[in-house]
Amino acid sequence: MLKTRNKPYTTTTASSVPYSCSGPFNEDVFYKHPINSGANKLTIGMFSLGLSVLSQFDYQILLAPGGDTSNLQEVVCSNYNVLILANGSFTFVIDNFDPNDVYYLRVNTPQGLLAPLLSSLLSTTTVTMYSEYDATLSIATEEVKEYKIINKPNHLQIVTDKHFESYQIYSLDGKQVKTVNSLDQLDTIDISKLNTGVYVLLLEDNTLKYHHKFIKS
């Protein structure tokens, strides 16, 4: 069921999908978004109004490559708090995707909480999922056409005339998960040991640094 931009949702059901990053849960709801034609930027977010109790939203962003829901892949798993009589929110932006992919935002009720509580929280929550063409991203791409990175399941292939000799890989929380310095020019980067998720690659040559966001499936 397609959820449009900035729409609240108030009905929860239990699903049999095994991808749960927060452990056992009672109820969950999925928001679906196919990539719009010509888009190069996907924004996913939630904004919740505070109630009379402290609450926590556990959410998960899933990728269905080419729309294949039998091959769901976790992109990110996290949560945010909604303080008493205050607001809570998160925003997640993806700018490196296949136009045939479909993304899902999954929100669940952690074990020990009642399903009606999730419905109540969602009734005061705005969910945002939209893909668009961002001209600034296009300009940035033009500026760094000295290289191209092909994302494969277990490695990144670098196609370039530039001489990259070192790189670092960071998780989205800012932790460095891998670093390599080499005397030889880099043409492939092994990512086979990374956990599934979204990462940022920092490439360096003698003068400049280049950032590239990629998904490890």
Image (spheres, rainbow, N blue to C red):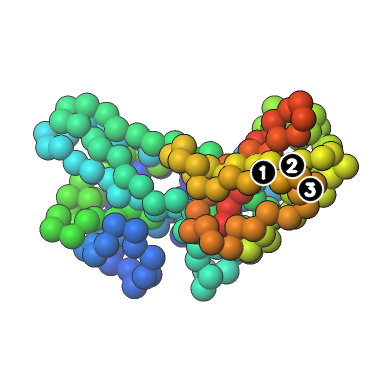
Question: Toward the viewer: 56 or 6?
Answer: 56
Amino acid beneath label 2:
Glu
Tell me where residue 190 appears, x and y as whole percent: 64, 58
Determine contact: label 1, label 2, CB under 8 Å. yes
Res 169 quadrant in image: top right
Residue 39 higher or lower than 118, as above or below: above
Dot 2 alpha-carbon crowd within 10 angstroms: few under 14, some 14 to 19, many 20 or more: some
- Mark 3 falls on what kind of element? loop
The earlier-in-sequence mark between 2 and 3 is 2
For the C terminus, the quadrant is bottom right
Helix or strand or loop: what does disc 1 sit on? strand
Mark 2, secondary structure of its residue = loop
**In the rendered image, is residue 6 in sight?**
no
Q: In which quarter of the image is residue 49?
A: top left
* Front one among 154 and 78: 154
Mark 3 = which residue?
184
Residue found 38% across the figure and 65% down from its top: 19
Circle on res. 165 = 2
Q: How many labels does the image show?
A: 3
Q: Which amino acid, mark 1?
A: Asn
Residue 203 percent coordinates (x, y): 69, 39
Question: Residue at position x 50%, y 47% from top?
Answer: 177
> Who comes first in sequence, dot 1 or dot 2?
2
Q: Do the residues labelled 2 and 3 touch (CB within 8 Å)?
A: yes
To which residue does mark 1 refer?
181
